[in-house]
Amino acid sequence: MQRDISVTIGIIGLILVVSIFAISSSQNTSLKLSENNAIPNTFVLGENDTNKQQLITPTASATPPLLKSPAVTVTPTVTPSKMPTPTETKTQQFTCNTNSVVQKSKVLANQFMNKHKTKDISVLNLLSAPESQDDRESLDSWLGTDIDNSPRLYATTSTIYKTVDFEFAGSLIDKGNHLEIRGTRRCQQTVIEKRRVETPDTPFSEESVTRYLNFSLAEDGTLILTGFSKDQNGTKYTGFN
């Protein structure tokens, strides 16, 4: 009986020893597995891996490098300066009623009538050149160049009168565009002329006649005396009759 108890105790003791040894072995194995499974801080590559670089895991306390921003070229915006608007040059529109035109017409009209009053044949030079064949023939006749170069102006029965006085009636009249000269206008001044006729049949006679001085007005304001007519629409030299 005592022997059986001793055997039982012995078996129990053996079981305890085996259990303790098993527990101890299990703890060592766990520790080795933990150590083997840890991520190493440094990996050393083999000597044959010469084309590979050594990788080093940065420590937690290391500050990551700052990323360098790519250089950006900024082109400044240039606002074009506003071109100054050129001042428009307004061309003056000359008319027969423009003051400067009226003054020029008075000067030309007085020059012409004063020569006409004194029977100065050079009065023909104050008129512009003939504009038609009829005008050319009339001028040749007054100058006498068509026959014997003996002037006929103031020597015919229709021109032996003497101009005693003259006056301008009304204002300068606009007669519209000049048909023969492009870009010009026609202006006309009425003249009241007092003529005296002395002939053997009529020793003394005075009469008032109306004549017309015609002008050509260019776009630039140039005014030219073009004719001395008997009627408002008469030809260039009929006013002498």
Image (cartoon, rainbow, N blue to C red):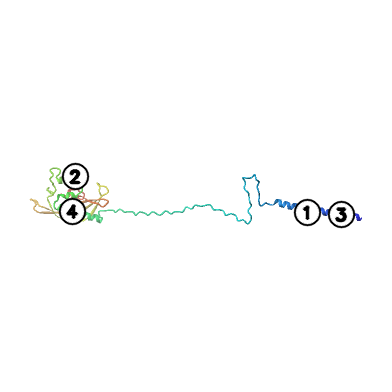
Q: Secondary structure at mark 2?
A: helix
Q: Looking at the image, is mark 4 or mark 1 earlier in the sequence?
A: 1
Of residues 175 and 163, the one drawn nearer to the viewer in this rendering: 163
**Disc 4, disc 1: CB below 8 Å?**
no
**Disc 2, disc 3: CB below 8 Å?**
no
Residue under numbered circle 2 = 136
Residue under numbered circle 4 = 111
Q: Secondary structure at mark 4?
A: helix
Q: Looking at the image, is mark 1 or mark 3 earlier in the sequence?
A: 3
Which residue, as the protein is rendered here, is positioned at the far right? 1
The amino acid on which the numbered mark 4 sits, given as a three-letter code, is Gln
Q: Residue at x 80, y 53 (%)?
A: 21
Which residue, as the protein is rendered here, is positioned at the far left? 200
Mark 4 is surrounded, within 10 Å at the Cα level, by few (under 14), some (14 to 19) or many (20 or more) other residues, namely few
Q: Secondary structure at mark 3?
A: helix
Q: Quadrant of residue 136?
A: top left
